[in-house]
């Protein structure tokens, strides 16, 4: 059984997340493909993993468009979903379910076998001036909505966690083994 992990990224940090996830899948072949570099006509995947970073509450438009154009071909295949975000490593982690739900609703009528929200990397000073302004506006909005939140104390670091990503890969493999009905599955 072989599959592909499709992802996109703006600042490249999700690329490593993809490699860590695939590190956790030891007994299946998984190719990693950035959306935009996918050659037309490829359709041999037996399972699909799809991931996106969150920008202003949404997955990247390229990922949403990719799902829309491909999901008909995925209908009887196991699909797995993940998002990376800043919120996942904050007290707003529960908000990430909404991000995941958005991607899951885009996949409808396919129901993903597993979905996961993973912490991302945000080094604000390394983003474009435009993105810094967008993020500052976003923080002001959260600040206005929540008394507990203090934008000036917000941490912008690399919050990615290799082990957490690898664990998601292991969980994907376990789920795939279960789908195959393989009694000798290795975790
Ligand atoms: C302009 C901008 C908007 C963002 N919006 C959100 C957001 O709404 N919620 C969130 O949790 N993280 C948000 N983030 C953080 C990204 O999701 C996080 O940095 C992600 O790991 C980036 O992945 P990439 O390096 O693969 O592009 C935002 C980051 C930027 C620069």
Image (cartoon, rainbow, N blue to C red):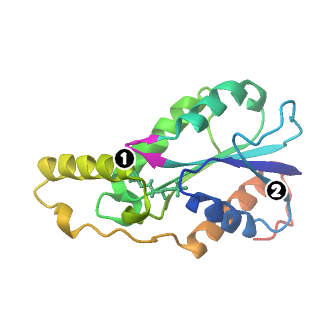
Which residue in the structure is indicated by mark 1? 130
Residue 30, disc: 2
Magenta-drawn segment: 54-58
Percent of width and height locating residue 116: 54, 54
Q: Sequence-wise, which precedes: disc 2 or disc 1? A: 2
What residue is shown at x 69% (from left), y 42% (from top)? 35
- Number of callouts in the render? 2
Magenta includes 155? Answer: no
Q: Quadrant of the C terminus?
A: bottom right
Q: Is residue 155 above or below residue 47?
A: below
Camera-side residue of 30 and 158: 158
What residue is shown at x 59% (from left), y 74% (from top)? 162
Please, what secondary structure does the residue beneath circle 2 have?
A: strand
Q: Main secondary structure of the magenta part?
A: strand
Please, what secondary structure does the residue beneath circle 1 have?
A: helix
Query: What separation in Å lies between label 2 and label 1 (alpha carbons)?
Result: 35 Å
Q: Is residue 38 above or below residue 107?
A: below
| The image quarter in which residue 148 lies | bottom left
């Amino acid at each position: 059984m072989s599959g592909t992990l499709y992802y996109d990224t703006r600042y490249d940090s999700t690329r490593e997340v993809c490699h860590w996830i695939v590190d956790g899948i030891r007994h299946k072949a998984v190719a990693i493909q950035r959306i935009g570099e996918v050659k037309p006509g490829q359709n041999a995947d037996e399972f699909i993993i799809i991931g996106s970073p969150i920008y202003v509450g949404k997955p990247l438009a390229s990922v949403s468009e990719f799902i829309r154009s491909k999901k008909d071909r995925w209908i009887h295949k196991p699909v797995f979903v993940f998002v990376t975000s800043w919120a996942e490593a904050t007290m707003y982690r529960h908000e990430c379910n909404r991000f995941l739900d958005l991607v899951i609703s885009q996949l409808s009528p396919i129901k993903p076998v597993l979905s996961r929200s993973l912490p991302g990397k945000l080094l604000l000073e390394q983003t474009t001036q435009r993105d810094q302004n967008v993020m500052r506006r976003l923080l002001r909005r959260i600040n206005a909505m929540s008394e507990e939140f203090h934008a000036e104390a917000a941490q912008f670091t690399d919050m990615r966690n290799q082990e957490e990503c690898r664990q998601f890969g292991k969980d994907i493999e376990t789920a795939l083994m279960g789908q195959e009905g393989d009694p000798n599955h290795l975790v």
